[in-house]
Image (spheres, rainbow, N blue to C red):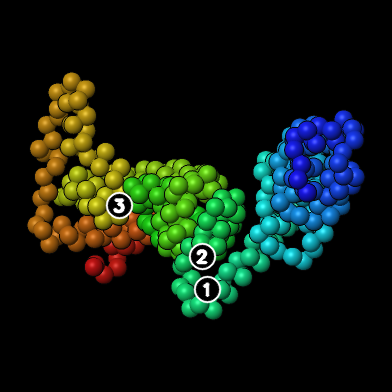
Amino acid sequence: MKYNSEDVLKYINGNELKYDPEVYEKNANFMLDVLRLTKDKKMIKFCDKELFKDSDFVYALMDIFKNDKLLCIKLSNEFILNNTGKYTIDILNIALKAQEINNDRYIDEYRLTGIYLNSGYYVLKDFIIKQLKKENIDMNFCFRIIQTLHPYNEPFKKYMAKHMIDELFESLDNLEYYVKSRYSHSSYIENIGVIQYIINLIRGTDEDLADYAEFHQELLFNKINELNKIMIEWKEEETEIEEEVYEIIEAFCEQYIDISIDTCLKYISKELNMPSLLDHTFESMNENLIEMGYEELDISDVTLDNVDDIEKQRLLNKLKKGIVLYIYNNKHPKQHEKITTIKNIRLLKNASKKQDI
């Protein structure tokens, strides 16, 4: 059926048309033109029922009335209900449109669409995985296949990418435990950068997904916030531990006066990756004094070691053992009692009784 803009106006005004109104009401493009022009949702009831089985028509209808969230959610829910048990890109696009209009906020009326979006991912991914296995393609190319299937469907790609990223992080079980069990110090991740670390983590599973995430960092928003929070708390824990480690070193140097505190600080800082310990060295103190315009201290008497290299290494190893034991106990508070500053000295004595490394 051919029609023009005059036919649309005639229909709206109730004027006589070339064909019966029912003929026009079965035409998706005609009714969409009517609705775009009137913006009157009451006109929807004149659309033929068969049109609501067409995903393109429903999608366009939701776009016209996108400011009416409840109407769009209703349209989405009804379309999904009429296609129960089916998981196709067309149906998914309807659900994604409703999600976009609803700004990802959950309300009771949105329930059916929300359930579909959660379950649809696993069905679609399972289908893609079967295709990969069938064609003997490496699983690391999963997202590449998704992009190939629907290269111009950005909502679909974002939906699949978001769920794939969420699934990856869920598999880690506990992000805090994951990063802390692999790195002895927060500086490792800090040097890489939180965002780059997350992208690298994704890259280990799927190169194409990582590339996509790098250009769509809004998908990583929650993960970035979570890791940033972990980093803040981690650095606070490290600062607290490093302050007590400094006290251990001070106590050690009082016990073994032949070895300087600067030597111990530099050794432990390097061995256990505690860069902030260097702030306590006399060398660092003097640098700060010079920067502030003060006269530097004469530290020649307190920085010289009065022991030979073999004895020095023996003492440093003894110190390192005590500190490693202290850190171990404080990093496992559930299994071990938290060690106080007074107990640190006992640790050193216990370590000194053991055979030196």
Q: Can residue 184 be seen at all in this image of the molecule?
A: yes
- Residue occupying the point 48% across, 62% down: 144
In the image, residue 124 above or below residue 31: below
Disc 2 crowd, CA 10 A, few/some/many (<14, 14-19, 20+): some
What number is the disc on residue 132? 1
On the image, the x and y values in percent for residue 329 come to 44, 58
Closest to the observer: 67 or 286? 67
Which residue position holds label 3? 273
Q: Can residue 348 be seen at all in this image of the molecule?
A: no
Closest to the observer: 67 or 221? 67
Q: Which mark is first along the chain, 3 or 1?
A: 1
- Residue occupying the point 9% across, 57% down: 308
On the image, the x and y values in percent for residue 54 come to 76, 55
Amino acid at the residue labelled 3 = Asn
Closest to the observer: 179 or 164? 164
SS of the residue under disc 2: helix
Alpha-carbon distance for marks 1 and 3? Answer: 44 Å
Which residue position holds label 2? 145
SS of the residue under disc 1: helix
Amino acid at the residue labelled 2 = Ile
Q: Is residue 127 left or right of residue 261?
A: right
Q: Which mark is first along the chain, 2 or 3?
A: 2
- Residue occupying the point 75% across, 34% down: 5
Query: Disc 2 vs disc 1: Cβ atoms closer than 8 Å?
Result: yes
Q: Is residue 351 left or right of residue 336?
A: left
On the image, the x and y values in percent for residue 282 come to 19, 37
On the image, the x and y values in percent for residue 82 come to 82, 59
Alpha-carbon distance for marks 2 and 1? Answer: 8 Å
- Residue occupying the point 66% across, 43% down: 100
Query: In which quadrant will I find the C terminus?
Result: bottom left
